[in-house]
Image: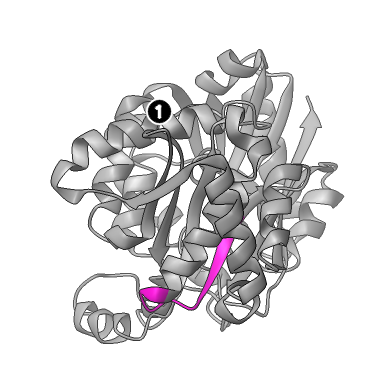
Amino acid sequence: MSTISVNPVSGKKDLNLFIKFPWKIYKNEPNWVPPLLMDRKKLVDKKNNPFYKHADVEFFLAYKDGEIVGRIAAIINHNHNKEHNDKIGFFGFFECVNDQSVANALFKTVKDWLKARGMTGMRGPANPSVNDEYGMLIDGFDKLPVILMPYNPPYYDNLVISAGIPKIKDLYAYHVSKERSLNERLTNIAGRVAQREGLKFRTIDMKNFDKEVDDIKRLYNRAWQYNWGAVQMTNEEFDYLAKDLKQIIVPELVIIAEFNGEPIGFSLSIPDLNIALKHNKNGYLLPGIFRLLWHKKKINWVRVLVLGVIPERLKTGAASVLFYETAKRCTENGYPDGEAGWVLEDNTMMNRAAEFLNAERSKTYRLYETSL
């Protein structure tokens, strides 16, 4: 009889096995985009990633008959629990062969770990937080994943549900295209709303990058503060992310909305580097850098990573106009298509903003939760 064991990751060798395990799961999956190993290492780096300064985490590997067959992380985000007055723990980085007994063992390990530390519920997947890759793909498997969005086999949803962890919330992603969104009617409506509400739009000033990041940081934490499950990023987390994004952003695609000269919202879109990374099979930057640079020239999609306005301006139509302005400027800069997301299924205002643009809902991601 086969035996399954789930063991904590111990040492650099185990951590490398944890990071590289997805290559086993996706070796025959044509739509999987191999991440850069250097980025995965940063994501799980407990010493240098500022997220882990306010979170406890344990990484685990599952073995069956001596072979690695799954991985998972148990996470306690103390800032989440302070903000929401919760005792919720998270699971994340879930990857598993199509074997319910392995999945059950992985989830039981996380439940036991969280319960021993006083948690009363488990939610996920969070990789490792709401501000990183979040949720599990449940449809749209025929489409390439865009940059910084998760991808997984279709059978994962069944593994989670069958382990007794039901859905708690869905997240939507939208396909925004020049053909559907930039017609004369929408252009006229957006112009009228912008004029009526006194909205102005500008792009980020890279010469004053640090000041701009400070303004965007305040906008981000205000605009998302009432969203279900949202957690404000610490200054250190935001600066850590900004440092990475600075290397890949197109300044014309970072748009700040202003009312009476004051910033009230922003959108951040980045080129979908997955179109280039798709061709870098092993995850190493070298020697694949030349292949990446060649395919980077062919990128014509963006990921609308963040788009929002402060709560006081939500009912003015500002979000819809900002969404329109984002699509317009992306198209003008050589990106006629993009994916915007994610958006909570019950975030009425932002889903209406996507509908205003005739955006097509293209993918759904799912979060699960159970009591402990």
Residue plotted at (84% across, 50% down): 161
Residue plotted at (29% across, 44% down): 242
Horizontal and vertical percent position of residue 87: 67, 17
Query: Residue at the left extreme?
Result: 207
Nearer to us in this view, 320 or 47: 320
Q: Is residue 67 visible?
A: no
Is residue 203 found left or right of 81 in the rendered image? left
The span shown in magenta is: 332-341
Horizontal and vertical percent position of residue 299: 38, 80
Q: Quadrant of the N terminus?
A: bottom right
Quadrant hosting residue 316:
top right
Is residue 166 found left or right of 68 in the rendered image? right
Horizontal and vertical percent position of residue 268: 42, 53
Q: Is residue 85 visible?
A: yes
Circle 1 is placed at which residue position?
Answer: 218
Residue plotted at (85% across, 42% down): 164
Horizontal and vertical percent position of residue 250: 29, 63
